[in-house]
Amino acid sequence: MSFRAAAVGLYVGLAALMGCGDGAPGGEAALEQALSTTAGRTEGRFSPRPPPLSGSTPHRMKVRFELALKAPNGDRRVVVDRRIDRGEGGRFRVVDDRRAAVPELAERVDGREAVFDGQRFASRRRFGPWIERDLLYGGHERTLRDAYDLGAGVLAAFGDYITWQPDARGAATLAGVPVRWEMVSLNRRVAPRPLDAEALAELRDHVDNWRAWAAATHRPTRVSGELARTRSGEVVAGELEIGGQATVEGVTAEFTISLTYAVETLPKEAGFDLPKDVLPEARDRTWRMIRDVLGDDLSARYR
């Protein structure tokens, strides 16, 4: 699961708690046939977009996302703390800490980590083993893009409710990229379009449409903060807070979303070496063994 998908899953999941054949080659032959179709492909064809903050100098970015709900059946909270270290030659390290608190349950702690040393890429779920990943399909590039995406997700969901005004600091340079500071406030002329329960469920359970669900179910009554963004809209520094009422499956709660970005020069102690105990990408895997043994008898849904 990507960093972005993990954060989205936590956000949506917590809000939802308010309502609480013959002739086909098999085995190694099938694998060889599948691999042969990748001939001539490059990572660029799978991830044509430039990396986040393209042209930036080595830096450390700290991002904090928090969602708090005051619901009739108890308060809930999700916190995502993320650290992104960027080095020379495309190297990076991402550390993702996540906490979720719900009534009558112990606080859930989880997270992700990923590191790219310029040649090899490895990641792990927090407390799990480090696993090296194949670079062929650009997973390391997607991980880096997703790591910067918390702010983009919030702004996409609530952009219609936000009014932007020039900040006194104006233009600046952060992490080697030009940015412009802007103040944000509430656009009081926006009203959400009413949707029935079925339409809302389809939006919420879709990885690309959850922002529309959030905008339809969460009505901001206050927006404040100031953000430094690049010309393309990437958030580099600043704070944003959005508060109001959320109504999910007939239950209404007060919500507050806060987002903080801070960027600094990359500390000298930052490192991009892969762990020595990383599991190799070409290791034996239980799922591969199951797939090879069952072959065409494997249910279509698992293919």
Image (tube, grey):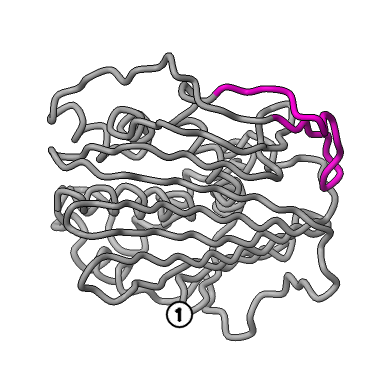
Q: What is the total number of numbered labels drawn onto the structure image?
A: 1
Give the vertical position of 189 relative to 89 (above or below).
above
Residue 180, placed above or below residue 117: above
- Element under label 1? loop
- Counting from the top left corner in percent of width and height, residue 118 is at 74, 61
Specify whether residue 243 is in view.
yes
Q: Quadrant of residue 218?
A: top left
Position of 209 with respect to 61 (left or right) is left
**Among the 4 quarters of the image, the one containing residue 208:** top left
Q: Residues within 10 Å of mark 1 (few under 14, many from 20)?
A: few
- Residue bounds of the magenta highlight: 163-182
- Mark 1 is on which residue type? Phe
- The answer to if 232 sits in the magenta stretch is no
Q: Residue at x 67, y 37 (%)?
A: 227
**Left or right: 75 with respect to 135?**
left
Q: Quadrant of the N terminus?
A: bottom left
Mark 1 highlights which residue? Answer: 127
Left or right position of 5 against 174: left
What secondary structure is the magenta-colored segment mainly?
strand
User: Which residue is farthest top?
Assistant: 189
* Nearer to us in this view, 35 or 48: 48
Q: Nearer the viewer, residue 26 or 20?
A: 20
Residue 78, horizontal then vertical, whole percent: 39, 59
User: On the rendered structure, is 79 left or right of 22?
Assistant: right
Which residue shows up at 72% across the image and 74% down it?
A: 273
Task: Name the residue: 56% across, 79% down.
Answer: 278
